[in-house]
Every structure is written in structure tokens, then in C-alpha cells.
Amino acid sequence: MNILICGVGGQGTILASKILAESAVIDGSDVARTGETIGMSQRGGSVVSHVRTEKTSSPYIPKGSADILIAFEKCEAARCLPFLKPGGKAVVSLSEIKPVAVSLGVMAYDSKAMESFIKTYAESIFIDTEKLAAPFMDGKCTNTLLLGAAFGKGFINITEDSVKKAMEKLIKPRFLDVNIKAFEAGIEAVKDRGNV
Amino acid sequence: MKESESKMKINLLGNGAIAMGAIAAGVRFAAGYPGTPSTEILETLKSNEYAKNIHIEWSTNEKAAVEAAAGASYSGVRTLVTMKQVGLNVASDPVMCLSYIGVKGGMVIVVADDPGPISSQTEQDTRSFGSYAHLTVLDPSSPEEAYEMTQYAFELSEKLSRPVILRPTTKVCHASATVDVSEGVYDYTPSGFVKDPKWVIFPPLSYKRHIENFKMYNTPEDSVYNRTETAESDVGIVTGGVTTAIVTDILTDLGVKVNRLTIGRPYPFPTEQAKAFAEGLTKILVLEELDPFIEEQLQRCVNIKVCGKYSEHVPAAGELKYENLINIICNFLGINAPGTAPINPTVTLPTRAPVLCAGCPHRASFYAVKLASKRKKAVYCGDIGCYTLGNAKPLETTDTCLCMGGGITVAQGIKTANPDTDVFAFIGDSTFFASGMTGVANAVYNKHNITICILDNRTTAMTGGQPHPGTGATITGAETVHIDIASVLTALKVGFVRECNPFDLDSAVKTVTAAAEYDGVSAVVFKAPCIAVAKKPCSYEVFDCIGCKRCINELGCPAISLAEEKAVIDPVMCYGCGICETVCKPAKIRKIGGDV
């Protein structure tokens, strides 16, 4: 599977990507690869993590070939949509983080147009992460919650048990429980919800 | 001798794989200076259970790291030095000389290059540096290969008695893969330092070594990392680094087989192997990021058409991504690129450049200097770190940025050429220790008249928060002497030295004003910790906003945005620094939570 995770630097995309790669290996993949954005962009810039759970040589997903897009922010979802393959799925946070240039009035953030663009090209589900993730360390578990939503929809062919094992391995013990709860809340949130 | 050969599968970043390779190879001394994309190598070592017997340090800069490691290598200890490509410029003095003096214990210098560039000042190519310095360069194409190559590099270094450069690029350093890691650690007893004239670089010795190096690197042994794969085709593709991996995927996707030459050891270049590869072929395509290094080597030794950067088949700069490469390859092979139907956005998306974090003390420091120099002719000389982001709107307080430590010295030239202008130099605390102090001495000694603003946030922030000599802790968290920046400045005879809290805006502005008025070298140390190392004190909220936008237009804090023409503060992003409360003239921004 090719999974693309995108968001804004500081949102925790890298942990989500590590969890997916780790759980894929626990689930029996020979090799999982990720490609991360680490560096200057982590300071509030656009960040993307590529996750590949089947044998490839390169960790980077070509445009038009991601099976699923997990977006932590709406504008970043729209920016990364060209990575999705035809019929690809998208799990998108409704969160809007406006770049400073937008607040300064130099650029526009057309939320409605972004949403309709995403809906036109992807089988997508939008998640109100601000509301749903609030109970889990003031929104700091948005990453594990969104992973939960993707699993809840059955978009990712890795077992839930492997994901939890991966979380045990990668998350500090004192934050593990709250992250597992956020993951489960993500699964719960998409139950009985059709795709948009 | 490896203790055991059992293997375990671990998901590792390329940088983690290099660290694990060094552990397996018995590294005992590891030093470096943080720099994207190399930082995670030492950080992996720091937290690894097998690394307990390794001396690990963040050195003050790359030159210090190489020199300290050289001393350990002279004593038979296996050493690792890590840096980013521009760090090699700082370290180039000892590195160039070490190619003559040589080493005893294996010495691997990891220099991470950054095609794009993504987080760097330059797109320089360490393969070219290796050729210039006469040092072997290994160029891994994946984390797995980086793990193997690191171990091989230590062996090779001891065999040649020279340092070996391992040159991963960003997309190897920051990619992860499942790596088979061996649990054994190479065990040996270092010889200790043995006195010998060979450790003293004198002209006659350099002459002798220059001849040795010339012979050694012009008649290299074959390397397993330079691989030829033949196919029923009259054309060939030559690749190096991560491009090798991407091209493998592309040829699989296209279902095409061509002759391939993979260059994993670009210097010394495998001339004979390349000649043999070209025999019977009609043309060759070279795909490599950064310099046309392989391309130039091939131009020298083969007589067939070589397509690459000089022939404009391949772009001269930037990363080579799958999408570019597939088009270049199809064009070269004369086949149609597979018809992909890319999704074209029907909406214009705002770009999202990196910004100073909400609550970042640099924002307050820049703002204080901006207010203090309002209505005056002023030039702001920046430096390398998070605070380079001070150039963005609305702060616009970075007019120049050249290289590590360059701000203080560039300021001196600007002031000399523009005597009617107030010139401010900004530098972070880690950068100050890395390469700022000599510039301060120059300013004092040569009677320059500038104001130095030290942004002391108690960490090396841009690379993720590493300690430095001003933090009182070493890489392992152990307590150490804290070198006080204001005391250093005073010792360097800076005439005006003051410390201030940038969030106490009025007082900070007064301090900067006095510093700017001082005739001679003045310095203000802005002391406030990076939000990544400090606890969030509280949040702020806007009550009955009148929509004047002053907070947004003055500060450009990412936590403040407009909703229906009124300012709103994102409670998750807000770090409670309170600078917006100070700036809000109608006094509509107030503290919530924390110790109200």
C-alpha cells in the first residue's frame, strides 16, 4: 500500500508514519519504507510523509499512485491530492490552519473550494478533529485519531492489533494510553458514516 | 571480531541506519555539529543501549569535531564525525590536511548533502569535495545500503589509513526502511597514541603523501558498490545515490530493461569498469543529483554520447523526483511516457512557508529591534538558524544571510560602507559558539561600530533542540559548565553588553536603543527559552476585537488569524508568550488559563 500523510509542521505526521511502517512490519511486510519531511518545513511549513508497505526500491510515492491520503489540514489535503491514484481514498481533517500570508491578506484561503475539489476527486471522509481530539491532551493526539478514522473506514489493510503493538513500541509509556484511546475514538467516529 | 551474528529487523531512518552501522563497526568516538539532514545520526547513538561505551559529543562546530576525532583515530580508536554539507566547509581545513596525515583507527566522516536544497544554503556536492581532497566517497542509495556501507567504510579507512567520506543525501537520511541489523559489535583494543614524526604535517611529508595519494586514488581497487548489470539493449543508464532506487522503480514500472551502471563509490571513480560498461553501447544517460560528477568522469573515459546535465537532458539543479525522471528516461529511450491523468487543483492554494512558531522569543526580539530602529536607516544582518525566518513579512528584519557566523562580520562591512546606517547583527546562541566569537573579536579589534543581538533561546532550535556550550548540558544530558555569553562578550572587550527579556518589550526596546547609540561594538543578549524547551505558561484570547488587525500586521504570529474580520487566537497553537497583548492597542487580548 502507498499511504501519503500530509499536514503542517508540528502536527505530528512523522509519528503517524512511523506507526504505519512499524505496524506493517509487525503484520508481516518484508520491508516498509517511509520518506519524511524533517528540517526547515517543520517550522509551520507544509510537510508530507510517504509510507510504502510493499516491496519497492524508493520510499517516495509517485504522483497518481497513493492508495490513501491522510490529511491533517484541509489546504494540505488539497495540495497533496495529485498524489492519489484514481479511485483513491482520503481521510481529511476539517482543521484549517491559515498561513500567516493569508492573515496578512496577501493570499486567500478558500475553504469551500478546497473541500469541493477534494470531494470531486477522492472518495473522502472529513473528520472534525478539533472537536473529536480535544479530550485527548488538548488535541495533541490528532495524529492517532486520524489513523483510527482511516482504519475505521477499512482503508488500510493492516490489523488493528498490529497498530496497537506498534504504538506500544513507539510511544512513551505515559502517553500510550491516551493515544490508544484517541485511535479508538477515531475508529468510533467513522462508524456508520458513509463516504462523502 | 564480531561477538555474534544474529540479526534483527528494525525500521530505521537512513541516519539511524548509519548510527547502527557505526555501532556494529565498533565506533568508540563520535562527534558532530547539528545540521539538517545529518542530525539524527548522533541522536540515535545517544539513545542506543549498545552505545554506552562510545564517547559522543556535539562539538562546538564541525572543525572541532573532525580535529577531536582525528586525535582519537591517531590513537587507534574508530571514530565517526557527522555534519551537513556546509559543515564540511567549516571542517575543510582539518579534512584536507588529514588526507595527507592519514589516520590509524578507522575514521568515517558522514557529510549529508541536500539536493533541492531543502534546508540548506547551498547545493554543493561532497563527491566533488572528496575528489578535490583525495578522499574516498561512498554514496548510499537507501537506508539498508547506508547500514552496510558505514561498516565497510570503517574497514576501508583502516586499510587505506585515510578518512573515508560517507555521503548520504536528504532522501536517504530522512527515509526509513526495514533493516536487518546485526547484534554483534566489532571488538578491538586501540593501540593508544604512539609518538611518530608521521603525525606532524611538514612540507616534505606532504610532498611524499601527495604522490602516494595520487597513485592510490588513480589506481583504485574495484568496489562492490559499483555494480554493472547488463541487458539486451544498446543503451545504458548510469546512476548514483537515491536516484538509483527511484530509477529501479521506474524501469520496473515501465517494464523496460537497459544496461545499468550504479556508482556507489563515486570517488575514486571506477574508470576501467566504466569503459567496459560503455563498450558496444550507442549512448549513455547519467542520472544524478547535484554536480554532474559521474557525467564528467564518463566524458573523460568513454567515446560514446553521454546524456546528462551538460546536454540538458537533466536539469542542472534541484531534486530528481520520480515524475521528472520517468520523463527523462522515456525521452532518452524514445518511448512514450505512460499516460497518467494527474489531478489538477481547481482551486488556488496559499503557499505555506515555514514561520517562527507561535510564542517564539525571536519574534519578540526582532520586534523590539524593529521598534528601536523605527524611522532610522537600519540594516539587519541575519544568520543561520530558525531566526533566518525573521526575513518574512511582517517582521522583515533579516536583510542579509550568508553562512554560519557570517552576520556579525557582514555587518562590519556594511557599516563601513554605509556609515550613516545603524547596523544590527543577529545570531543564535549555538551559532555564536560555533562561529560567532571570532567575528566579535574582529569587530572589537578593528573598531567597528555595530550592534550584535544574540538570540539566546538555550538550544540549537532549527535542528530540533540540541544542547551547546551555553546550555550547561552535554548531548547525553550530563551536567557540564555553562559558558555565559555575556561574560564571553565582556571578555572579548565588547564595550556595551546588556541582557534582556524580549517579552518585556518596553525594557527591551530601551536596551536596544541604548546599544544602537553606543559608539563602538555593543551587544544585547535576548534571553528567553525556545518554546520547545519551555513549558507553556498560559493561553491568550481576544475579547470584543475591533478588527484593527494590528496584532497580525505587526507580529505575524501563526496562532492569530482572521475570522469574519476579527482576530482569533488558536488556543492549541498559542504558546502564551503575551507579545500580542502588549501590541494590542485597544487592549482586547487577555491572558486565559495559567497563573492569571
Image (spheres, coloured by chain):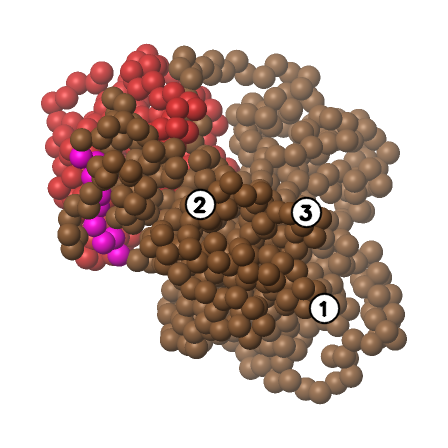
Extent of the magenta region: B535-543
- Compared with residue B409, is residue B395 higher up or lower down, i.e. above or below? above
B158 drawn magenta: no
Q: Which residue is drawn at 13% across and 42% down?
A: A135
Residue closest to the eye, B251 or B94: B94
Mark 3 vs mark 1, CA separation in Å: 42 Å
In percent of the image, x 27 and y 43: which residue is there? B581
Image mark 1: chain: B
> Amino acid type of disc 3?
Asn
Q: In this view, does B119 lie to the left or right of B213?
A: left
**Image: A14 above or below A74:** below
**Could you tell which of marks 3 and 1 lies nearer the N-terminus?**
1
Q: Residue B286 carries which label?
A: none
Q: Residues within 10 Å of mark 2 (few under 14, many from 20)?
A: some
Q: How crowded is mark 3: few (under 14 residues within 10 Å), some or many (20 or more)?
A: some
> How far across and how far down the image is residue A55, in percent?
44, 37
Q: Quadrant of residue B326?
A: top right
Q: Identify the disc placed on residue B418.
A: 3
Residue identified by numbered label 2: B371
Judging by the rendered image, the residue that carries numbered circle 1 is: B98
Q: Which chain is red?
A: A
Q: Give the residue type at disc 1.
A: Leu
Q: How many numbered tags mark residues here?
A: 3
Q: Does the CB distance between marks 3 and 1 fall below 8 Å? A: no
Is B272 displayed left or right of B237 in the figure? right
- Identify the residue at image location x=87%, y=65%: B211
Nearer to us: label 1 or label 2? 2
